[in-house]
Image (cartoon, rainbow, N blue to C red):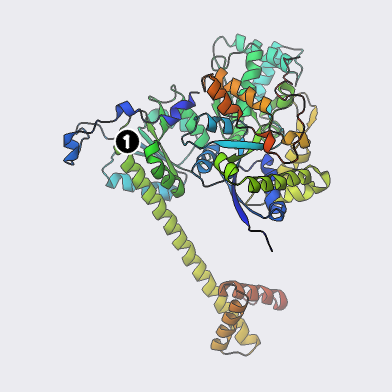
Amino acid sequence: MSRPIEPIRLGFMPLIDAAIPIVAADKGFAALEGLDLQLMRETSWANIRDRIAIGHFEAAHLLAPMPLAANLGLTPFEAPLVTPMALGPGANAITVSRALYEAMRAAAPDLQVNDPVSVGAALKAVVQARAGKALQFAVVHPHSAQNYVLRYWLSACGITPDRDVEIGVLPPPLMPDALASGAVDGFCVGEPWNSRAAHQGAGAIVLTKVAIWRGGPEKVLGFRRAFAEAKPQVLQAALRAMKAAAQWCRQPEHHEELIDILSRANRLNISAKDIGAALTGTMPLADGRQIAIDPFGDEAALRPDIGAADWFFAQMVRWGQVTDTADNCAAATSAFRPDLLPGAIAAEAATASGFFDQA
Amino acid sequence: MGSKSLTRAFDPSLRPEPCAIGALGLNLAPMTSPDLCILVLDENTVRAAIIEAGLREAGHTRVHIVTEMHGLVRRITEIAPDVIVIDLSNPNRDQLEHLLQMSRAVRKPIAMFVDQSDRDMMEQAIEAGVSAYVVDGLRQDRVKSILDMAIARFNAFSRLQAELEDTRQALEDRKAIDRAKALLMKTRAMSEDEAHHLLRRTAMTQSRRMGDVARALVASAELLLGDEK
């Protein structure tokens, strides 16, 4: 007797960290669990947000703070989400234009690349010399780890976001060109866009997100809460398939095949060379050092730590996106549900610590 | 970033009170109100033109089409639209939403056109592949007709594209079937009818389309016999 096939429609953006759901579908891990995992590629986070809300998708690849925003009523449609799994620590970094990098080096000759305190001090010196003319930075979305991490670091270094540095939104593929044309002075984005800007000679990678915040998810897997509650067994099956896919992705001997799968036209539709560089390559820092990229992390990285949700909520309050009430806090943090992950993964030392300026 | 404004496209207090005149079916829109300025963001120039034509037919004269996403901020600032219609395949939607919430970039805050009572309509819009943003406080009934029209035109455009694709496919099938028949007639000394029946029978037993069977036959013949063009 064969099990009924459960359809799950999952929206994703064509980014490296969509690898786990893509592999779950394309390598048959979902089918093994009796699931018909249908992947739908999207062109904006706004589309994913709207389509999961109106029920076109049961699940989606999301920016980590998006489920919090959905549960806080910050989205156009009321549709609570739950996040039982994070999709790895990612590879975000902060890249500045060559001109800004030279100005930073001139202002602080002892600049240590990838040291948040040193890079922050150099940037602050440049900001002060500009006497009120704000720098322009870009992130992918207001509700993104990139936005909050960038703002956290700037503030910790005595730079005021929105006054000293304006932070706008740009689609990541446009960021290297925006840097080259002078439309922006810097950005915080995932790979391969930092490396792309560095290779084009337009940008200098000055800081990795890991140097600012050691843990913390950038993308997560979200489900409609109504679906998770109505079909707990299907959810468990989906998560087992995702865990198996994650394990497959982590193994270096699968990387060649993974690159092939991801580069397909209906998946990322990016050249195998670019995907290979983002998966197994290194990120070229401004001082010539190469930083190894580890897009998947270990199994513990799959755990959507509630400490991280707490931190995202605190940032949303800090930047005026939401008011600080007990109800809001509960709505936000209840988005992350590590308890739903099958074969619970032990909590590491709380993810929300691990900030460069906290002992 | 005040994204809360996204959910507050319409302040209920700004809605006209129902009144007796409304019940008589008279148009409550003030006759002196200026024509709405509408911006259509669509990288598909053909579809953009279809939307524009629809808006002009509906009596809107201030319609701007932007198909080129470079310098979007400047264009929006210049045009200062009351309503923005955007296709959902546009990767700049995240940027647009952020931009619309920044008071410095636009004259008045603009939010996604959404209201609990209009959830159905937004669902239809998203199904059709279009979304709309309107300036805060704009009367809902005035926007509704614009979005209705956009949804209808998007759907019509999709149907047209599907029909075009079907026609193209049918033509290619015809060509492949003719070549396959010619091959069979030549190599197996069949009549045209026999060749046709063989192709149809094969397609039926293999549950494949006749065009696909013909294409496979032509492709293998090219491999075996060399290109017989």
Q: Is residue A108 visible?
A: yes
Indicate the position of residue A165 as horizontal and vertical percent values.
57, 18
For label 1, the crowd category at 10 Å Cα-Cα, with few meaning under 14, some 14 to 19 and many 20 or more, is some
Q: Amino acid at mark 1?
A: Gln
- Please state the horizontal and vertical placement of residue A78, each as a whole percent of the image: 48, 36
Front position in the image: B1 or A217 = A217
**Which quarter of the picture shows residue B185?**
bottom right
User: Is A36 positioned to the left or the right of A321 in the image?
Assistant: right
Judged left or right of residue B167, residue A344 is right
In-front residue for pair A346/B84: A346
* Res A211 quadrant in image: top right
* Image quarter hosting the N terminus of chain A: bottom right
Q: How many marks?
A: 1
The x and y percentages for residue A3 are 67, 59
**Is B187 placed above or below A248 here?**
below
Query: As drawn, is A53 to the left or to the right of B213?
Result: left
The residue labelled by disc 1 is B140
Q: Chain of mark 1?
A: B
Q: Secondary structure at mark 1?
A: helix
| Residue at x 38% of width, y 24% of height | B107
